[in-house]
Image (cartoon, rainbow, N blue to C red):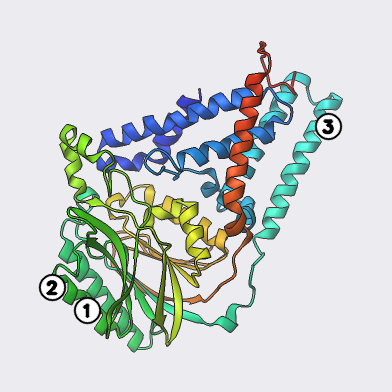
Amino acid sequence: MGYLFGVAFLAVTISWVHVLGVWVAALLVLVEALFFAGLGAALSLVTRLRGWPVLAACCWVGVEYAYSRVPFGGFGWTRIAYAAVDTPLAGFLPLVGVAGVSFLVALAGQLVAWLVLTLRHRGLTTAVGIRRLAVVAAVLVLLVGAGAGLRQWQTDPQPEAAGELQVGVVQGNVPGRGIEALGRARTVTTNHLAETVALMTRARLGLVPVPDFVLWPENSTDIDPYRDPVTRQTVQNAAEVAGVPIMVGAVTQGPGAGERQITALWWDPDRGETARYHKQNLVPFGEWIPLRKQLLPLLPILSKVGAQSVPGTEPGVLPVQAGGRDVVVGDVMCFELAYDRTVYGTLRAGAEVLVVQSNNATYGGTGQIEQQFAITRARAMEARREIAVATTNSVSGVIDRSGRVVQRTNEFTAASLVTALPLRSSLTPAVLVAPWLDRGLAVAGLLACLLTLRQPRHRHSAPSEVR
């Protein structure tokens, strides 16, 4: 039953992978659904124990912990906390992080299930039924009330003393759609140059503030500016037109032969590149091929992935100069949003402003676009940081630290905007505690399953507390 649930759930939520091939989507769904088979088994075990709603919620977190890490780095795109960004439970994000909110969402569901099973077997008129109805109602009211109140809580309510940066966000658009969206790489870079010119024209006319730096998206150039003089000159021209640094999303060659890295380059109009960051979490079969030597002969279509991408090893922080001061810009690149360790590492490494560079062009017109924006909103609430998002053709925009969308662009268009990002240094409890909470809840679920395996087996038709 868990496996069938997983197939149905994933067929709805990640069917957008079909743009890479229907067989790719089918294989991904069928493999990832195995984790939900494990969840079904875990739930059937822990419901034999007292307090099973809490233990069942731990099992949900444990399964999310597993599929966010394996295989090949994991695919933690469908964690239930991401679906809670518009609910009162999102108020807990800065306290307990994504893992903690997943636990609370699962707990709410398990408590309702516990109540339904109780009423089915004992009825509402019994003392047990009334007592458990009161318990469930009280817990749900407490969660909703506390979460709603916490949505207003801020870690540093007065950031003005640290100042702010004006960030120009450029969405240059791309010439195609689907898997061929970035086929004309020079055109993509030229589009971002053109939109930068349009943005700076509006800024110099006083229609928008003059930015302290300009943010280009991931893959705003798919050609290494150090290997290609035309691309290098295009980037340099854009920086000179802007008169301020540009944070360029590039593909750089190396470190070895036949290898590449997905890179953020801080490009100063006078000094050229002064800082860089290499993307850490790469998309399996999209940016790199696991078991490449073995799979390429069997599946020649994988050659479309291109050179093997190599992950970076350092946090996504760039110590740079912008707006006449030294600042630390934190960068999260696209797929990295789903990885707690990467996001928290960027913040703990001293990021004062937070930006996202993303290339969603391949998935235009699918549910992936809004899903990623929802994940970005969850990260903004979790870190209590404003986030500027630049994508190649959607959705770019600005999210405030309460998760509200301040500005956003439309799909398949060229667009640009300027936003103020306050400089912040405080860290929420989630950034410090959530990694341990994640592991702790997962271990609690595992131990509960092991405990039931040590107990004598007996037939049961319903969870122990109901019987």
Which disc number belongs to residue 229?
A: 2
Disc number lying in front (3 or 2): 2
At 34% from the left and 47% from the top, the residue drawn is: 366
Asked whether 204 or 77 is in front, the reply is 77
Asked whether 357 or 316 is in front, the reply is 316
How far from the left and from the top, in percent, is residue 276? Answer: 33, 69
How far from the left and from the top, in percent, is residue 54? Answer: 68, 36
Rendered image quadrant of residue 227: bottom left
What residue is shown with label 3?
Answer: 131
Query: How far apart are the two marked residues, 1 and 2, measured between alpha carbons?
Result: 10 Å
Q: What residue type is labelled 2?
A: Pro
Rendered image quadrant of residue 136: top right
Query: How far apart are the two marked residues, 1 and 3, measured between alpha carbons?
Result: 70 Å
What residue is shown with label 1?
Answer: 236
Query: How far apart are the two marked residues, 3 and 2, measured between alpha carbons?
Result: 74 Å
Q: Looking at the image, tell me whether mark 1 or mark 3 is earlier in sequence order.
A: 3
At 79% from the left and 26% from the top, the residue drawn is: 124
- Residue extending farthest top: 459
> Would residue 228 be found to the left or right of residue 115 on screen?
left
How far from the left and from the top, in percent, is residue 440? Answer: 62, 43
> Would residue 399 be found to the left or right of residue 103 on screen?
left
Q: Looking at the image, tell me whether mark 3 or mark 2 is earlier in sequence order.
A: 3
Q: How crowded is mark 2: few (under 14 residues within 10 Å), some or many (20 or more)?
A: few
Q: What residue type is labelled 1?
A: Gln
At 59% from the left and 78% from the top, the residue drawn is: 159
